[in-house]
Image (cartoon, rainbow, N blue to C red):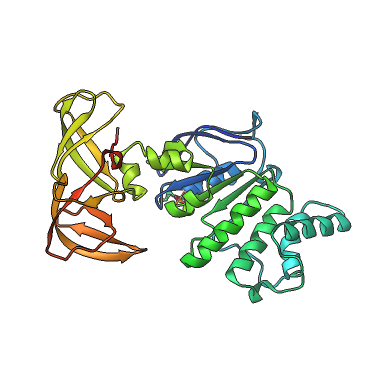
Amino acid sequence: MLQLLDIAKDYENRPLLRGISFTVAANETVCLLGASGSGKSTLLRIIAGLETCEQGTVAWQGQDLSSAPAHLRNFGLVFQDYALFPHLSVFKNVAFGLQMQNLSRPEIERRTREAMTQVNLSGFEQRHVTELSGGEQQRVALARALAPRPRLLMFDEPLGALDRALRDRLLDELRGILHATRVPAIYVTHDQEEAFAIADRVLLLHEGKIVRDGSPAEVWNEPGSAWAARFLGLGNIVEGVVRLKVETLKVETRAGGFVLRCGHAHQTGEKVNLLLRPSGVRLAADGNLRGVVTDVVFQQARFKVTLENGLYFYLPEAPKIGEAIAISIPPSEVHCLA
Ligand code: ADP
Ligand code: MG
């Protein structure tokens, strides 16, 4: 198990990481999700031992790694551009890390073939990496990382440059390989779809801190803050004022009044942020939200309808642009963001 305790890192006297703590358990794929420049790559380099930090501990099974150099940590890294050697065959690319380890020739051969089997690359041994497709190159990079039998794998935006269809296919493949090999992994990305597709657990990195840590479903249901709901693209965020708090909360917003259930303690007159999820709504004459349609886009068997107040919803049928509509949003789709 990898343990991070209170990691802090400054760049040019500005704090980048401000006390990061989390663990990665056996067999677990943890996805670190944050905007570009939030410090994700820096954190991976600290874990790998390629960068120092001002404060905090990186430990494995309780043992502090601060005196362990990168090559003795036995962590594998896969980068966005794969960093393959174009002049070497697939076999030599995969064997590369093993050759640095003073292993016998038969052992290198055995482990290289084992890693190539794990990623379904058997038969590709003598091919040149420049002849391979993007997906195959990705598998070579993964095999090269797996060959030394790492106790942890780290991926730094490995699918960043690929188109969507290929990316989705590789994500499925990668998830399958990670589950089959049972190597714990940290997967870094700025793309929430990618994160939710691959992760057993999602960590949201924002302003140097982990602001949310949970399963994809938990983070989706309870983003925990307006920033997280916006970053994850969960829906409309509107500010409102609490008008009444009895069993349910009544909140007045620029988009209309909403009644919702909320576990937090609120007071009358308090300002809160509401998340209005765009799905699960319908057109209804007595709907709780009214507006004039400014845009309609067909998206995957439904219509994304934007109103003049900037809010958007998914509807099964398309209203006309300029039409005044009323939408009924059930309480289950209205969520109070702390
Ligand atoms: P991410 O991977 O989330 O995009 P990085 O960890 O690459 O973020 O970088 C976060 C910020 O840290 C960058 O915006 C940059 O300003 C700063 N940074 C990263 N590496 C260095 C460095 N070697 N020297 C100075 N600043 C750096
Ligand atoms: Mg990065």
Report whether residue 10 is seen. no
Give the residue at x 18% y 32%.
Answer: 250
Above or below, 162 relative to 6: below
Going by the image, does 270 lie left or right of 42? left
Going by the image, does 233 lie left or right of 145? left
Residue 31 percent coordinates (x, y): 51, 46
Residue 300 percent coordinates (x, y): 37, 63
Above or below, 74 relative to 136: above
How many marks can you see?
0
Above or below, 222 relative to 294: above
Residue 321 percent coordinates (x, y): 15, 65
Going by the image, does 248 lie left or right of 209? left
Q: Quadrant of the C terminus?
A: top left
Q: Quadrant of the N terminus?
A: top right
Farthest bottom residue in view:
131
Above or below, 167 relative to 220: below
Report whether residue 178 is seen. yes
Give the residue at x 70% y 74%.
Answer: 128
Residue 132 percent coordinates (x, y): 64, 73
Give the residue at x 72% y 61%.
Answer: 94
Going by the image, does 281 lie left or right of 58? left
Q: Nearer the viewer, residue 170 or 300?
A: 300
